[in-house]
């Protein structure tokens, strides 16, 4: 199936594996929350048990350096893409409200990004992720 939009998650290449997975999960949930139209229908198994809806299109996961993350963020803002961000300070918090305080304390020009998720027209997401490489 061909999609008009693209979802991409960029994670800092120097993170531990558990951190990359954690950040990716948080960021994907951000896209789902900001773009409910990106979700498919609920899943139902053969016994009739219902499961939650998932994003209805593939999510491309990229490994990125700090420069790539900042560049992608600038492109996302300029192109008005849906954007979810995760900064390093959020690892030291214990709950959502503290995450928002840590996020607000970051420099608006150069936050210490360790993860970024984007959704928007394919062409724009491709331009924003240029320079990052698909995660191995």
Image (cartoon, helix red, strand yellow):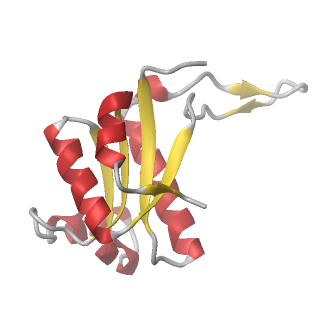
Count the marks: 0
Task: Say if 81 sits above or below 117 in the image.
Answer: above
- Identity of the residue drawn at 34% across and 38% down: 125
The outermost residue toward the front is 131
- Identity of the residue drawn at 40% across and 56% down: 132
In the picture, residue 93 is in which quadrant? bottom left
Task: Say if 19 sits above or below 53 in the image.
Answer: below
Task: Say if 119 sits above or below 90 in the image.
Answer: above
Along the line of sight, the residue nearer the viewer: 104 or 72: 72
The C terminus lies in quadrant: bottom right
Image coordinates for residue 122, horizontal then vertical, percent:
38, 29
Along the line of sight, the residue nearer the viewer: 6 or 133: 133
Image coordinates for residue 56, horizontal then vertical, percent:
57, 28
Horizontal side, residue 8 vs residue 45: left or right: left
The N terminus lies in quadrant: top right
Image coordinates for residue 62, horizontal then vertical, percent:
47, 55
Horizontal side, residue 46 vs residue 96: left or right: right
- Identity of the residue drawn at 47% across and 56% down: 133
- Identity of the residue drawn at 52% across and 55% down: 25
Can residue 32 be seen in the rendering of this structure?
A: no
Along the line of sight, the residue nearer the viewer: 82 or 67: 67
In the picture, residue 6 is in which quadrant? top left
Horizontal side, residue 99 vs residue 1: left or right: left
The outermost residue toward the right is 47
Can residue 60 be seen in the rendering of this structure?
A: yes
Image coordinates for residue 105, horizontal then vertical, percent:
14, 71
């Amino acid at each position: 199936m061909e999609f008009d939009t693209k979802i991409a998650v960029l994670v800092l290449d120097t993170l531990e594996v558990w951190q990359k997975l954690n950040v990716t999960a948080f960021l994907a949930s951000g896209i789902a929350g900001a773009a409910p139209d990106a979700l498919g229908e609920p899943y139902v198994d053969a016994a009739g048990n219902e499961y939650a809806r998932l994003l209805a299109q593939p999510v491309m996961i990229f490994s990125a350096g700090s420069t790539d993350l900042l560049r992608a963020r600038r492109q996302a803002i300029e192109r008005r893409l849906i954007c979810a961000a995760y900064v390093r300070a959020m690892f030291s918090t214990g709950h959502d409200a503290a995450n928002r305080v840590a996020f607000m304390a970051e420099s608006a020009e150069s936050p210490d990004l360790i993860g970024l998720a984007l959704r928007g027209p394919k062409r724009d997401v491709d331009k924003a992720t240029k320079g990052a490489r698909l995660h191995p």
